[in-house]
């Protein structure tokens, strides 16, 4: 089976999101723990679905959702750091990883959309 960088990175990030959510629950921060758990693990699940997409449109839609989930997760991570719920030194590596996922997913979506548009133009002409 062919390896996928975004698949591997989103899976590794989900594992870290689970660890952070467990720690937050130990700190009695249940609501934000749930938010981090849902959005942080949803990135990888949507990437997995995209890779099994039945069409180019399905692939683009799922990767777009993964990108949105990454942005939501980054929001929660920023909130955790800025509110001092989690020390900035502990949250910074996760924020950096999340930004990397956002960049990768955004590039995938843009490239796929451009490729799909070019294909439509070729078919019309």
Image (tube, helix red, strand yellow):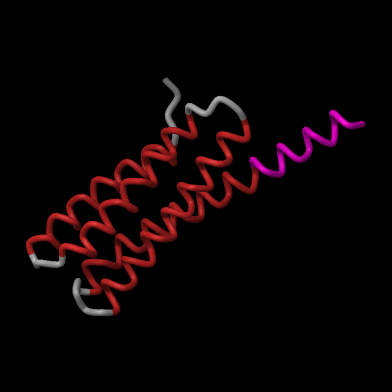
State the residue in front, 115 or 90. Answer: 115
Determine whether, in the image, residue 30 is placed left or right of residue 115. left
Q: Quadrant of residue 75?
A: bottom left
The residue that appears at 31% across and 66% down in the rendered structure is 77
The residue that appears at 28% across and 59% down in the rendered structure is 35
State the residue in front, 57 or 113. Answer: 57
The residue that appears at 17% across and 52% down in the rendered structure is 19
Identify whether 107 is placed above or below 87.
above
Farthest residue to the right: give it. Answer: 125
Farthest residue to the bottom: give it. Answer: 83
Q: Position of residue 8 (x, y in %)?
A: 36, 38
Q: Which residues are magenta?
A: 112-125
Q: Position of residue 91 (x, y in %)?
A: 26, 67
Farthest residue to the left: give it. Answer: 26
The residue that appears at 44% across and 33% down in the rendered structure is 49
Query: How many numbered badges does the structure rendering display?
Result: 0
Q: Position of residue 81 (x, y in %)?
A: 27, 74
Question: Image quadrant for the N terminus?
Answer: top left
Identify whether 109 is placed above or below 73.
above
| Residue 61 covered by magenta stretch | no
Q: Quadrant of residue 4?
A: top left
Determine whether, in the image, residue 53 is placed left or right of residue 11. right
Farthest residue to the top: give it. Answer: 1
Q: Position of residue 24 (x, y in %)?
A: 15, 63
Q: Quadrant of residue 115?
A: top right
Question: Image quadrant for the C terminus?
Answer: top right
Determine whether, in the image, residue 112 is placed left or right of residue 93. right
Determine whether, in the image, residue 27 is placed left or right of residue 121. left
Main SS, magenta residues: helix
């Amino acid at each position: 089976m062919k390896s996928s960088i975004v698949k591997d990175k989103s899976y590794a990030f989900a594992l870290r999101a689970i660890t952070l959510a467990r720690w937050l629950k130990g700190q009695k921060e249940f609501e934000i723990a749930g938010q981090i758990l849902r959005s942080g693990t949803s990135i990888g699940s949507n990437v997995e679905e995209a890779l099994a997409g039945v069409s180019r449109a399905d692939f683009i839609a799922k990767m777009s959702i993964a990108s949105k989930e990454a942005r939501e997760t980054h929001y929660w991570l920023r909130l955790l750091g800025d509110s001092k719920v989690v020390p900035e030194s502990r949250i910074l590596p996760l924020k950096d990883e999340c930004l990397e996922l956002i960049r990768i997913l955004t590039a995938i979506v843009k490239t796929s959309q451009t490729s799909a548009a070019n294909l439509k133009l070729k078919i019309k002409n």
